[in-house]
Image (spheres, grey):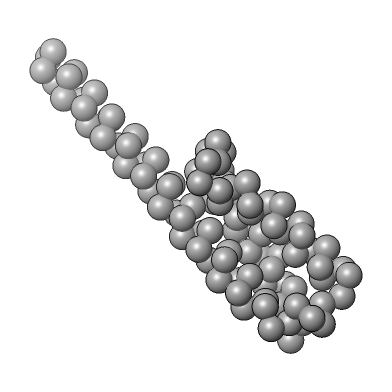
Amino acid sequence: MRKFAILLLFVLGACAGTTETRAINALAIACNTYATALEQLTPYKPDLTENQIGRVDAANQIADPACKSDSTLDPAEAVGAVKSAITLIEAVIGDAT
């Protein structure tokens, strides 16, 4: 029984590490997608309205803390924040085209 308990602890520990690794990878993908969305916005920057610029600034305030290498945010929660920032940028792109 003791061997089973020790084995169970190792398995649970491995699963926890896997979950965190997945969250970190998902955050890296989300941040990369956000950067790509900003790049797609570049041609429209000269023609953006004040409202659109404000929305881009708001998106940056959401995504920047999550995507910095020294971020202290929980990666799983940060993914949701970055996704919402991507949605804001996509909306601005949609309005600008």
Q: Split into 4 quadrants, where in the image is the C terminus?
A: bottom right
The quadrant in which residue 37 appears is bottom right
Residue 24 relative to residue 81: left or right = left
* Of the pair 10 and 89, the residue shown nearer to us: 89
Q: Is residue 97 above or below residue 56?
A: below
The residue that appears at 53% across and 66% down in the rendered structure is 33
The residue that appears at 46% across and 55% down in the rendered structure is 28
- Please tell me how many numbered marks the rendered image carries: 0
Q: Is residue 37 above or below residue 74?
A: below
Residue 38 relative to residue 4: left or right = right
Residue 77 relative to residue 42: left or right = left
In the picture as drawn, the residue positioned furthest to the top comes out as 2
Q: Split into 4 quadrants, where in the image is the N terminus?
A: top left
Q: Position of residue 8 (x, y in %)?
A: 21, 25
In the picture as drawn, the residue positioned furthest to the bottom comes out as 97
The quadrant in which residue 44 appears is bottom right
Viewer can see residue 19:
yes
Q: Position of residue 57 (x, y in %)?
A: 77, 60
The residue that appears at 63% across and 54% down in the rendered structure is 63
The residue that appears at 67% across and 78% down in the rendered structure is 42
Viewer can see residue 95:
no
In the picture as drawn, the residue positioned furthest to the right comes out as 50
Q: Position of residue 71 (x, y in %)?
A: 55, 41
The quadrant in which residue 36 appears is bottom right
